[in-house]
Amino acid sequence: MTWELLESTCAACQKCALGATRTKSVFGTGSRTADLLFVGEAPGEQEDLTGTPFVGRAGQLLDKFLAAVDIPRKDVYIANILKCRPPQNRDPLPEEEAACIDYLREQVRLLKPRIIVCLGRISAMKLIKPNFAITKEHGQWFDKNGYLMTAVYHPAYLLRDPRKKEDMLEDMKRIAAKLAELQGEG
Ligand code: URA
């Protein structure tokens, strides 16, 4: 599998009903040699219109946190569990996740990131463990299938509860430090 083939397959995907309602599928963006992969939930309105993940208000807040810990957005890779927008931004349905997850699995195989960061509980429940408790377990490290993983609050949640931004900054600092440590090891 190549990035190009995977992306074009995803762009034409009709494996679930979201294929009929999306404007654009939102494959992923960033560096295809990134050590750091962020995985959100699903595209929102702006993402559906542009085809790029995390460009709406939540994405702009994510950008601020990346800047705060000196990680250029162009150096990371950003994707979602679902590649198409659920109507009214409702939570992904199990059958939509099941239809879509192999795209992300293949992205991970191609990218081979050193760290995978789940953005929010939906992503953490899918990628780390089904009973992931974001309030208690954000910022903790998990080893899953040889990948170092962690989860942080979803930026859309931080827009609703700005008091959690301090925790987010601490988690992002810890992620940046771990990344520097791993990169220093070569
Ligand atoms: N929220 C997500 O989970 N993903 C996006 O791409 C945008 C908003």
Image: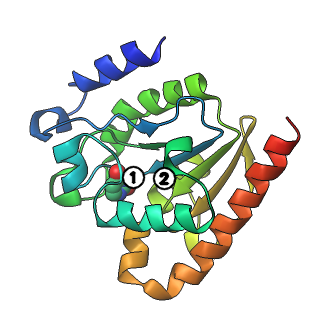
The residue indicated by pointer 2 is 123
Residue 131's disc is none
The residue indicated by pointer 1 is 41
Q: Residue at x 24, y 59 (%)?
A: 90
Give how far apart the Cα atoms at labels 1 and 2 are. Answer: 6 Å
Looking at the figure, which quarter contains the C terminus? top right
Residue extending farthest bottom: 163
Ligand 1 resides in the quarter of the picture at: bottom left
Q: Residue at x 22, y 49 (%)?
A: 86
Q: Is residue 64 above or below residue 118?
A: below
Q: Nearer the viewer, residue 78 or 74?
A: 74
Q: Nearer the viewer, residue 162 or 127?
A: 162
Q: Residue at x 47, y 13 (%)?
A: 2
Graded by Cα atoms within 10 Å as few (under 14), some (14 to 19) or many (20 or more), the crowding at tag 2 reads many
Horizontal side of 106 relative to 109 (left or right) equals: left
Amino acid carrying mark 2 in the image: Ser
Residue 71, x across and y down, in percent: 60, 55
Is residue 148 in view from this perspective? yes
- Quarter location, residue 68: bottom right
Graded by Cα atoms within 10 Å as few (under 14), some (14 to 19) or many (20 or more), the crowding at tag 1 reads many
Q: Is residue 134 above or below residue 30?
A: below
Helix, strand or loop at disc 2?
A: helix
Asked if ligand 1 lies within 8 A of label 2, the reply is: yes
Residue 128, x across and y down, in percent: 61, 50
Residue 64, x across and y down, in percent: 47, 67
Q: Residue at x 88, y 40 (%)?
A: 185
Asked if ligand 1 lies within 8 A of label 1, the reply is: yes
Q: Are marks 1 and 2 in contact (CB under 8 Å)?
A: yes
Q: Is residue 108 above or below residue 110?
A: below
Q: Nearer the viewer, residue 121 or 119?
A: 119
